[in-house]
Amino acid sequence: MPLWAVWVAHAIRLCVLPSGLWRIALALGVPVGLTAEELRASYDVPGWGTLQIILLSVLVEAVALLALGLVRPWGEVFPRWLPVLGGRRVPIAAAVVPAAGGAVLLTALTTWQLTVWGATDASDLTLIGPSYAPLLAWGPLLGVLTFAYARRRRSGLGRGFDGALAGD
């Protein structure tokens, strides 16, 4: 496993962290660039919006953690505790297709969001911008990591975790 790929996988987790912390602060009513009136009107905070925003933050972090599968053994061999699939090879396409699609989608969404920020009054972005800016790297980093995973697995270099894949 190339060390740079492991670093990229961990960098992806860190890319989503600032926006998640910003959203959690928002959900808890901390003034992070929005007024109390804007919080109530746009996000239902305090209220059900608080729970929804916190759950969204947890979900986004969990999705980012999936990038670790591209550099960890469970991205090449299903964990033994999984019924039916446990111990079998992860088909390359089962990891590459969703990861590549996610990379394209994330790049498109964050680029589009950047254009929306550009149309917004800069004073509104004092805390939001720096919190969300690292998300711009998520898609491209995932794309690079996905390419490296696919290349490594197709070349047969994916046997480095324990010397052999299950079923060999």
Image: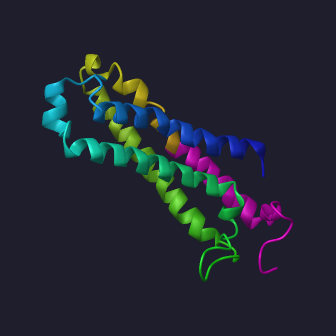
Whether residue 92 is situated above or below residue 28 in the rendered picture = below
Question: Is 146 or 128 nearer to us in this picture?
Answer: 128
Q: Measuring 30% from the left and 25% from the top, which residue is drawn there? A: 30
Residue 69 location, x and y as percent?
63, 57
Whether residue 110 is situated above or below residue 1 in the rendered picture = above
Q: Measuring 48% from the left and 58% from the top, which residue is drawn there? A: 101
Answer with left or right where residue 32 lies relative to residue 131: left
Residue ranking furthest to the right: 163
Q: Main secondary structure of the magenta part?
A: helix
Residue 143 location, x and y as percent?
57, 50
Q: Measuring 28% from the left and 47% from the top, which residue is drawn there? A: 52
Look at the image and give the residue range highlighted in magenta.
139-168
State which quadrant residue 39 falls in: top left
Q: Measuring 42% from the left and 33% from the top, which residue is drawn there? A: 21
Answer with left or right where residue 158 lies relative to residue 132: right
* Magenta-colored stretch includes residue 145: yes
Answer with left or right where residue 100 lies relative to residue 127: right
State which quadrant residue 79 falls in: bottom right
Residue 74 location, x and y as percent?
67, 63
Question: Is 6 or 119 nearer to us in this picture?
Answer: 6
Answer with left or right where residue 83 lies relative to residue 19: right
